[in-house]
């Protein structure tokens, strides 16, 4: 590995070690590699530092990374993966976003150059986490809380449901149809669940999975 690549790699891990990790650990997140997780109330919050899959760009001498944020809960994991993981990962969450959506830049990637001062990038990330992401965690600790953030998308043509940040009304999170369906059932919105299931079936969704979800809630006295 060249000195330039080593320097960028060091910048990346310094941003995590000196900036991201202390902030998230102070909010009781656990760390595993480039992943963080916190269980808050009924919800599991997951954060992942994603490096560009192509790695170091030799043509521009740069390396890019972004930060993904997800929300999940135990019943969702049990239905989809048949177990509740001790350390859930962001890519298994039904509700997800990228950090750029908190600053109006959608699919935003941070760019590292060899021998640069990475403090501005670190400071920006820390500011977003402290002022935008962690307040969401404090405000939304149970499944019912998530309805305060959801805009119902009746067409569902993209199979995505949009969630909004409470204060700015900026579009931040997206939920999978299965995740939304389970949220409907878990919070007593049977009519909404029935409508959503009908739309998913029209688009050839996995009906065996939907039946499995229904059976789980029926066993608790909740009828879809």
Image (cartoon, grey):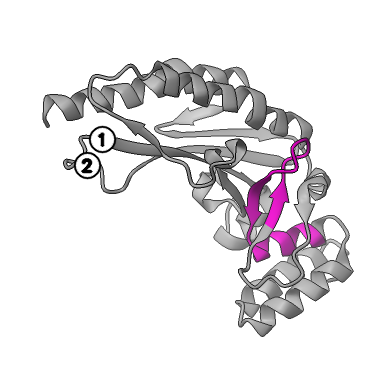
Q: Please name whichever residue, 175 or 62, is drawn nearer the observer in this view of the structure.
A: 62
Q: Secondary structure at mark 1?
A: loop
The residue lying at 74 percent from left, 75 percent from top is 197
Q: Residue furthest left?
A: 2
Find the magenta span and give its range: 162-184
Location of residue 66 in the rendering, given as x and y in whole percent from the top left corner: 44, 39
Q: Quadrant of the C terminus?
A: bottom right
Q: Secondary structure at mark 2?
A: loop
Location of residue 76 in the rendering, given as x and y in whole percent from the top left corner: 66, 56
Q: Which residue is mark 2?
A: 57
Location of residue 11 in the rendering, given as x and y in whole percent from the top left corner: 31, 22
Residue 135 within the segment the image draws in magenta: no
Bin the neighbour count of mark 1 within 10 Å (Cα to Cα): few under 14, some 14-19, many 20 and up.
Answer: some
Q: With respect to residue 62, does 92 lie above or below?
A: below
Q: Quadrant of the N terminus?
A: top left
In the displayed structure, does residue 121 sit left or right of residue 75?
Answer: left
Whole-Å distance between the Cαs marked 1 and 2? 5 Å
Q: Please name whichever residue, 150 or 190, is drawn nearer the observer in this view of the structure.
A: 150
Residue 212: which quarter of the image?
bottom right
The residue lying at 27 percent from left, 22 percent from top is 10
Residue 200: which quarter of the image?
bottom right
Q: Please name whichever residue, 35 or 125, is drawn nearer the observer in this view of the structure.
A: 125
Location of residue 137 in the rendering, given as x and y in whole percent from the top left corner: 70, 32
The residue lying at 70 percent from left, 41 percent from top is 43
Bin the neighbour count of mark 2 within 10 Å (Cα to Cα): few under 14, some 14-19, many 20 and up.
Answer: few
Residue 220: which quarter of the image?
bottom right
Q: Which residue is mark 1?
A: 62
């Amino acid at each position: 590995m060249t000195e330039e690549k080593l320097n960028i790699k060091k910048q990346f891990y310094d941003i995590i070690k000196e900036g991201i990790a202390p902030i998230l650990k102070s909010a009781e997140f656990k760390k595993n590699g480039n992943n963080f997780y916190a269980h808050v109330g009924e919800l599991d919050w997951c954060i992942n530092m994603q490096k560009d899959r192509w790695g170091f760009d030799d043509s521009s001498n740069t390396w890019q990374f972004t930060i993904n944020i997800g929300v999940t809960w135990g019943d969702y994991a049990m239905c989809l993966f048949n177990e509740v993981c001790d350390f859930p990962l962001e890519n298994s969450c039904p509700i997800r976003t990228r950090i750029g959506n908190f600053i109006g830049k959608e699919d935003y990637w941070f760019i590292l150059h060899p021998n640069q001062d990475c403090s501005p990038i670190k400071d920006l990330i820390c500011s977003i986490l402290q002022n935008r992401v962690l307040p969401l965690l404090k405000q939304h600790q149970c499944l019912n809380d998530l309805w305060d953030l959801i805009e119902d998308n009746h067409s569902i043509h993209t199979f995505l449901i949009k969630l909004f940040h409470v204060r700015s009304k900026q579009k931040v999170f997206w939920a999978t149809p299965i995740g939304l369906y389970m949220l409907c059932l878990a919070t007593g919105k049977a009519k909404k669940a029935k409508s959503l299931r009908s739309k998913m079936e029209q688009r050839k969704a996995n009906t065996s999975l939907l039946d499995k979800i229904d059976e789980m809630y029926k066993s608790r006295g909740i009828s879809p």
